[in-house]
Image (cartoon, helix red, strand yellow):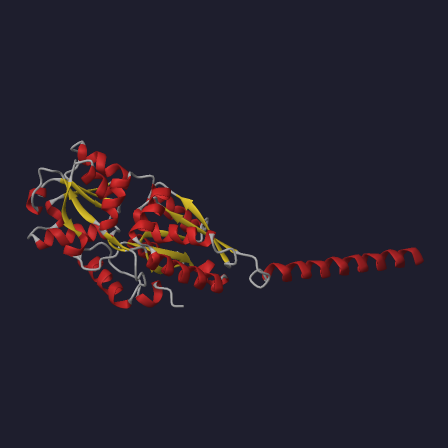
Amino acid sequence: MKKLYQNVLLIIVITAVFLLGGCSSKSDETATESTGEKTVIKIAYLPLTHALPLFEEVELLKNTPDSDIEIELVKFGSWPELLDALKAGRVDGASVLIELAMKTKEQGIGLKAVALGHRDGNAIIVANDINRAADLKGKKFAIPNKQSSHNILLNDMLVANGLSIDDVEVIELAPAEMPAALAGGQISGYCVAEPFGAKAVKLEVGKVLYQSGELWEDSLCCGLVLTDDFIDNNKTATDSFIDQYLAAGDQLTLETAKEVAGEYLGQEEAVLDLSLEWISFNDLTITEYIYSKLTEKIITYKISDTTPTYEEFIYQP
């Protein structure tokens, strides 16, 4: 009996030590920010000029050892692949077409847009034998996705010239495939994220019919989004990430943009030179005014039946 009592007492003591140790470990884990450990943020992207502020932030953080965040870039080759990763929670956020992010939000996926990727920088590129919008009637025109500002710009151009979306055959192509498709005659024009518009011009297989600013002043296209889960569990890191991202965009001069683009995009210098003439990276805050303009165009052109409100979709610090 005495031996049994001793065994029971020993079990109680061991259990108590284990539970106390477990509580201590959990406390250390939830105090990551206060112990000076960096919060790693996984961001999905496609290799586009429009993601340059993100690349610049990564470069700046390399020289900021005391920063509380670290960005892990996750590269994808197409928007569907990127969205699958975002929806499955394999990444914490993404540089993505803002209309695609809005549609994903409508589908019940928790995310918020925290900044723009750029301003302007999209061109209507056409074959060399196309001289006006009317020449595109009955021809194939490529966009990367129906849910895109490129689709809006195509509609803007057609309406401005007395045409409608039914006057062209719209197809979806991956951005990198568009210059070759134009050169081969499979399409007569396209609108896509840079540097693939500039590439066709430099290869002399196409030309600019319209710049985005001629059709939609201060147009927006790509946005930076974070998942609700990440934001809710990492408020301090979220705000730090956004602040440094906006600062990175403001600091992007033509020279630094060329350096960063050369490292991350692998395009020829002449292509990047032209592409960067078309695009702006400063003042990347998403205001209620520019968001209202975007949602108005989405509804007008029947790109989507509904859109999330500014309060639902745009992150408020």
At 26% from the left edge and 60% from the top edge, which residue is drawn?
306
Report x, y in % for residue 218: 22, 60
**Residue 73 visible from this viewpoint:** yes
- Is 96 left, or right, of 32 in this rendering? left
Can you say which quadrant of the picture contains the N terminus? bottom right
In the rendered view, would you say 112 is above or below 88? below
Percent coordinates x, y for residue 156 in the rendering: 14, 54
Quarter of the image with the C terminus is: bottom left
- Foreground residue, 231 or 299? 231
Q: Is 2 placed left or right of 303 in the picture?
A: right
Look at 40% across and 48% down and name the residue there.
44
| Left or right for 16, reference 266 | right
Question: Where does the image place residue 298, in percent across and percent down from the top left?
Answer: 22, 57
Q: Position of residue 19 (x, y in %)?
A: 72, 60
**Residue farthest along the front direction in this orientation:** 255
Examine the image and state in which quarter residue 312 appears.
Answer: bottom left
Q: How many marks?
A: 0
User: Quarter-wise, where is residue 174 in the image?
Assistant: top left
Say if 207 sits above or below 51 in the image.
above
Residue at the (37%, 60%) spot, across then down: 247
- Residues 175 and 148: in front is 175
